[in-house]
Amino acid sequence: MTGTRRVLVVTAVPPERDAVVLSAGAAPEPLPLLDHLVLHRVRPPGRGGNGPGGLLVDTLAAGVGPAAAAAGTSAVLALAPGAYEVVISAGIAGGFAPAVAVGGTVVASAIVAADLGGQTAEGFTDVAQMGVGVVAHRPPPGLARALAEAAGAVLAPVLTVSTVTGTAPRAEELAGRHAGAAAEAMEGFGVATAAALFGVPALEVRTVSNAVGPRDRAAWRIPEALRALTDAFAAIWPVLDGRQVMDVREARDVPDVRDDDSGRNRGGRVP
């Protein structure tokens, strides 16, 4: 597998993981790790569409919320130090109108912890304003832009929340504090925080199943959003199979650890 590039895609739940796997057009290889953590490995088609390309993609349904996402991502990266070129948080999300419509796709220009901080009578103060943490991770801009162009996606901030928005005032408050935000989900900041700890670039890709605001289940379009997720990743794989990922590694000074001709696994306990 000379020249193989490894990508880790982290979702919250199995249907999202399966939608990503489906984009590769091949049955996944399950790789049990710890307790309930199971990687599903696929090889997407090459840039010409004929046979496998240079990517080896491990997908993980880590659980709902930033804590589960960070823990699952950290576990995989610790078991395979230096193995992955990039980590992608993926799944369905709520979309902020009019930035993105239901059924649309968003690639994060920033991965933002929208409710990490304190609420006072004067309003919300995030931990960065408090001077005790960070509230945003920024994906490599060139790579994020290339993915958005390939997938026909909106390139905009994606908010990570621990409590899904269910009212119009809350939606307005978030949109007011985070100008230009296009989507709200629950895992991106956790994935990106874990990736940063291990020095791996992080991205986030979301497809919109519902509008952020009052929870009208009759208006949700989850199957459509999952199909859009499959389509988005089918468009993204050729970009990740190109030079952009290596360019990111060189820019971030992340070691390039790959499988060599001897077949030895140099990535820890993840084969």
Image: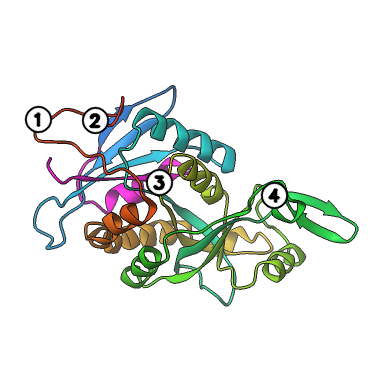
**Magenta residues, as a range?**
1-28
Q: Earlier in the sequence, mark 4 or mark 2?
A: 4
Question: Mark 1 — residue?
Answer: 262
How many angstroms separate mark 4 from mark 2 (CA)?
37 Å
Depth order, front residue of 255/43: 255
Look at the picture and state if 82 lies above or below 155: above
How many angstroms separate mark 2 from mark 3 (CA)?
16 Å
Question: Mark 4 — residue?
Answer: 116
The crowd level at tag 1 (other Cα within 10 Å; few <14, some 14-19, many 20+) is: few
- Residue 86 position, x and y percent, is 35, 49
* Disc number for residue 53: none
- As shown in the figure, which amino acid type bears the numbered disc 3? Val
Rendered residue at 31%/70% (across/down): 150
- As shown in the figure, which amino acid type bears the numbered disc 2? Arg
The crowd level at tag 3 (other Cα within 10 Å; few <14, some 14-19, many 20+) is: many
Question: Mark 3 — residue?
Answer: 200
Look at the picture and state if 194 lies above or below 226: above
Quarter placement of the C terminus: top left
**Secondary structure type for disc 3:** loop
Q: Quadrant of residue 207?
A: bottom left
Quarter placement of the N terminus: top left
Q: Residue furthest top?
A: 35
Depth order, front residue of 219/112: 112
- As shown in the figure, which amino acid type bears the numbered disc 4? Leu
How many angstroms separate mark 1 from mark 2 (CA)?
11 Å
Q: How many marks?
A: 4
